[in-house]
Amino acid sequence: MELTDKVALVTGAASGLGLATSQALLAAGARVLAVDVDEGRLQQQFGELSNRARHRVVDVSDDLAVQAAVAEATDAWGALHIAVNCAGILGPSKTLSKGQTFPPKLWNRVIGINLTGTFNVVRHAALAMTANQPNAEGERGVIVNTASGAAWQGQMGQAAYSASKAGVIGLTLPAARDLAAHGIRVMAIAPGLFETGMSAGMPTKVSQHLIDQTILFPTRMGRPDEFAGLVRHIVENAYLNATTISIDAGTRVGTR
Ligand SMILES: NC(=O)c1ccc[n+]([C@@H]2O[C@H](COP(=O)([O-])OP(=O)(O)OC[C@H]3O[C@@H](n4cnc5c(N)ncnc54)[C@H](O)[C@@H]3O)[C@@H](O)[C@H]2O)c1
């Protein structure tokens, strides 16, 4: 799908991978509704932009809020062609720690945002996309989900995070199958370690250990614009569908 004048919804758009993706889509000529829970950063990043960018506070785990965001995009610009799920949290905790089990509230929060939040966007975006005129290829829309290498190689403390990301990979194929008849592609990206707000929250010792011990080449964190470039490619390449692409410089992690 060509990006010029297309309408995109990007979640987690105030920071890191979602911010870089929003900027890349805008630079390619698309219109972007940037959503996030962080109003201050949304305002800072998107407040001064042209009428091709809008922003809105949305918690992706809130189904009605996601539905309202999709409605804002279609009301403002007449259609929604692209949805990119980048909202996510880590929520680390061990299965057992100091005589306590993994906090059930934290489990539900991580699954609620990373997995249910992703599917909320898939559902509502897909419904809006069915109203689009198909292009010459028959395409009406493209949805890109963000999983993680942790889906396959979760480390200690990542039970909820890994489960949520494995769920994102799991839903991508059946959603693509469900939506193929509507001309909507669904893809997922599994990033390795990227330089974002999320990785900035890690102790430097931990991130340096990951860089030194687990990344094959080049031995550095990924840059958000490298992720954004892959999103752009997925949108533009009609032959990519129903699969997960790793972008991780050959990372293989150990237990911790
Ligand atoms: N950075 C990495 O190394 C890495 C690796 C693998 C996967 N990921 C995934 O990439 C995605 C983007 O993360 P990032 O690294 O850019 O982190 P980030 O913390 O920089 O950005 C995540 C954004 O999501 C927003 N957010 C959190 N909860 C939300 C909610 N309920 N509703 C809407 N927005 C919400 C945050 O406010 C933040 O702006 C996440 O899904 C993350 O799990 C990141």
Image: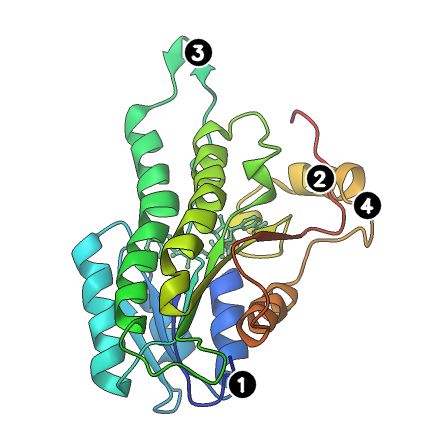
> Mark 3 or 4, which is nearer the eye?
4
Label 1 and label 2: CA atoms lie apart by 32 Å
Label 3 and label 4: CA atoms lie apart by 35 Å
> Of residues 13 and 150, which is closer to you in this image?
150
> Of residues 43 and 112, which is closer to you in this image?
112
Question: As drawn, which residue projects farthest toward the right?
Answer: 217
Residue 87 seen: no
Residue type at tag 2: Leu
User: In the displayed structure, does residue 15 sit left or right of residue 128?
Assistant: right
Q: Position of residue 220 (x, y in %)?
A: 75, 53
Label 1 and label 3: CA atoms lie apart by 49 Å
Q: Is residue 41 above or below residue 218?
A: below
Q: Which disc is residue 210 wearing?
A: 2
> Mark 2 or 4, which is nearer the eye?
4
Q: Which disc is residue 27 wearing?
A: 1
Q: Position of residue 216 (x, y in %)?
A: 81, 45
Q: Which residue is mark 3?
A: 98
- Tag 2, which secondary structure? helix
